[in-house]
Structures are given as C-alpha cells and as structure tokens.
Image: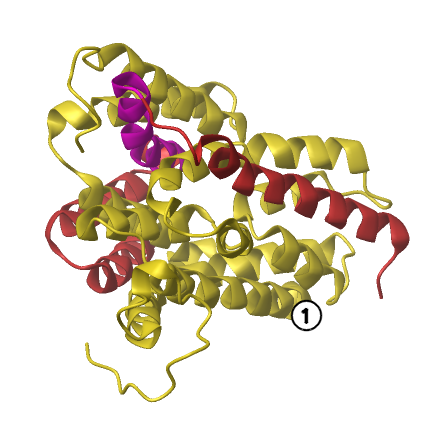
Amino acid sequence: MISLPVLATILAMAAVTYLTRIGGYLVLRNRTLGPRATAVMEAAPGCVLIAVIAPHFVSPRPADLLALAITFLAALRLPMLAVVPIGIVAAAGLRWLLG
Amino acid sequence: MTIETCAPAAMPGDGPSELRSNPRPEFMRGLVASLPVTAGFVPFALVLGAQAGQKGLSALETPLMTGLNFAGGSEFAAIGLWTSPPHLALITAVTLMVNSRHLLMGAALAPFLKALPKRRVLPALFLMCDESWAMALADARSRKTFSLAHYMGVALPMWLAWIAFTTLGALVGPVLGDVETLGFDMAFPAIFLVLLRGMWTGLRAARPWLVSLAVAATGHLLAPGAWTVAAGAIAGLATAWLWAAPRKTGAAA
C-alpha cells in the first residue's frame, strides 16, 4: 500500500513544509521589530491571502467574475457562514445561466 | 457562546494566557468559528484526493501526504508533477517554494506567541495553514492576546477534514466528476474575502494588498502557476516596506 519512493517523497515534503511553519517563529520570536518591519508584518496576511485568490479576479469567464462580485458584496457585510453559500450558489447559478 | 465547564485540566491548549480560565470554552469558540471554513475545505480535499488517486497514490499514501504536509497549494502542485516513481528533489523544491509564505506567516504570529513556551508552540505550528493562521491572527489582534485553545479549536477540524476528505477523494475519485461546475471552488475566495474584511483597517493600510492583487493577477495572466502567489505577496510586502513611515513611533498596531 505504501511504496518506498512515495514514502520518501511524502516525508521530504512534510519536512520542508514544517520547517517553513516554524522558521519565521524561531527567527523572530525574541526580537522587537522596527516600524518598517512591523508595517511589513501587518500587511503580510492580507497580501498572502489576496495573492492566493488573485486568479479569480482575472477569470476569463463572465459568470465567474459576476459571482466574485456578488461574493465580494456579500463579504462586505455578512458573516462567513452566509458568504460561503452565497458565493457557491452564485457561481453555480451564473455558470448554469451564462456558461 | 457558553459551553458547560466539565473537564478542566488537560485540553490541548492550556497555556499561560488561559491559566485564569478553563480552555474548553476557548477551544469551542475556535471550533465553531472554524466550521464554515472547514466546510469550504471539503470540495478541495475531494478534488485533490481524486487527482492523487488517478496518479496512482493509494488510499493510505494520500492521507499520509495530506496529513503530514497539510498545505493544499503545495499538494496540488505536487500531485500535478507526480510520476511513478515520483521525482523527489523536484517535488520537494516546489513544495518549499509554494510554502515559503509560511515563514512570513509565522513571523507575523511570533509577537503574539512570546508568552508561550516553545514546547507548546512548535507542535501547534504544525497545524498552521493559511486559514487557521489568518483566523488566529485576526482573533489575537482583536483580543490583544493569542489563545492557543482557540487556535487548536480552529485548526484541528481543518486538519481532520483535510485528511478525511482527501482519503474519500482518493477512494471515490473516478466516479466524482467535475466539482467545479457546482460552484464549490468559489468557497475559497468567499472565505478569504471575509478574512480580509476582518483585517481591514482603512484604505491606506490596504494599499499593499492592491499591489499584491495586481502583481499576482498579472502574473497569472502571463504564466499561471504557484509562483504568482510568492510574487504577489513579495510585491505587496515591498510596498508596505517602502510606504511605512520610518519615524513612526514604536510598533503601534
């Protein structure tokens, strides 16, 4: 069920991923950051998140762009539990309507 | 919400910040907050598991990967590159590149973890993914303190769901069909947009986000791939660095 090359690859992936998870903490845990570094750290979460979903903003399908706009408007006001189903239903419905 | 306080001592996250109170309500608060996000994991996990199954990974190897690695982007990339036998060096290098953002994420969380001992933080960071990190950081910023029990409540369901549904995907992959037509892929932008709203402190502070968005989106149009995430994030952070007022006093949030 588990072959050796597969196991080795999975363990190597797991090792480098865990190192990325603890690396930032271990390096910075006992330091106080200056204003520029603080600004970078405050911007980091938003920058990473928006970079991950950036492809959705330039989708070639009008249905997807419209669904994203609806999701965006919903996200301005509504809680997570409402925004996620709205996004899914909007995407499914608009793809069905517009292709 | 109020949860019955019946079992005090040994919850996963009772740290110095929770010495006063029982960690269970904190864990439950995290658990409840986590559920809609965890539900958003399900379609991605099914798709990833299905792709892994089609590449020949067994229903044991798939959860081994998704459970030990627990970073979806790198797993999609790895499965995309998977051959039999897999190219270890290539896949490890790609995994490192896709997950290098964790370094920044851990660094952003570090100031809130100073009160906790390393022996608690290091195992907990194993469960730090984009979503658990963003939720923990937003919570720590709004409450001015990091709650390890809340973090565990947020992250554990995500991890368990990721393992369970990638396994299911690997088992039922061939009969699943196209999940995208059903609209489930809109769950991630929806989750991330709500998280971004929670981090919003004004247009000025959000200018680096727009740079990240523009660079990552342009990169995606030119040459789609995992590199666009790194390029977008780095461009935004460079912007934050350049626009930060160097003489601003202290590290006021």
x and y, in percent, of residue B182 in the image: 40, 60
**The N terminus of chain A is located in which quarter?**
bottom right
Which residue is at a point 71% across and 38% down the rendered structure image? B81
Q: Residues within 10 Å of mark 1 (few under 14, many from 20)?
A: many
Protein chain holding label 1: B
The correct choice, above or below, for A34 with respect to B187 in the image is above
Residue B59 placement (x, y as % from top left): 73, 67
The structure residue drawn at horizontal position 45% and vertical position 39%, both measured from the top left corner, is B106
Q: Of helix, strand and loop, which mostly describes the magenta segment?
A: helix
Residue extent of the magenta highlight: A34-52
Q: Which residue is mark 1?
A: B171
* Amino acid at dot 1: Leu
Q: Secondary structure at mark 1?
A: helix
Instruction: Residue at 18% x, 33% y: name it.
Output: B253
- In terms of depth relative to the viewer, which is nearer, A64 or B139? B139
The reply, left or right, for residue B142 in relation to residue B6 is: left
Q: Nearer the viewer, residue B216 or B18?
A: B18
Residue B77 appearing in the image: no
Q: Position of residue A39 (x, y in %)?
A: 26, 23
Q: Is residue B68 above or below residue A14?
A: below
* Residue B64, placed above or below residue A54: below
Chain B, hue in figure: yellow
Q: Which chain is red?
A: A
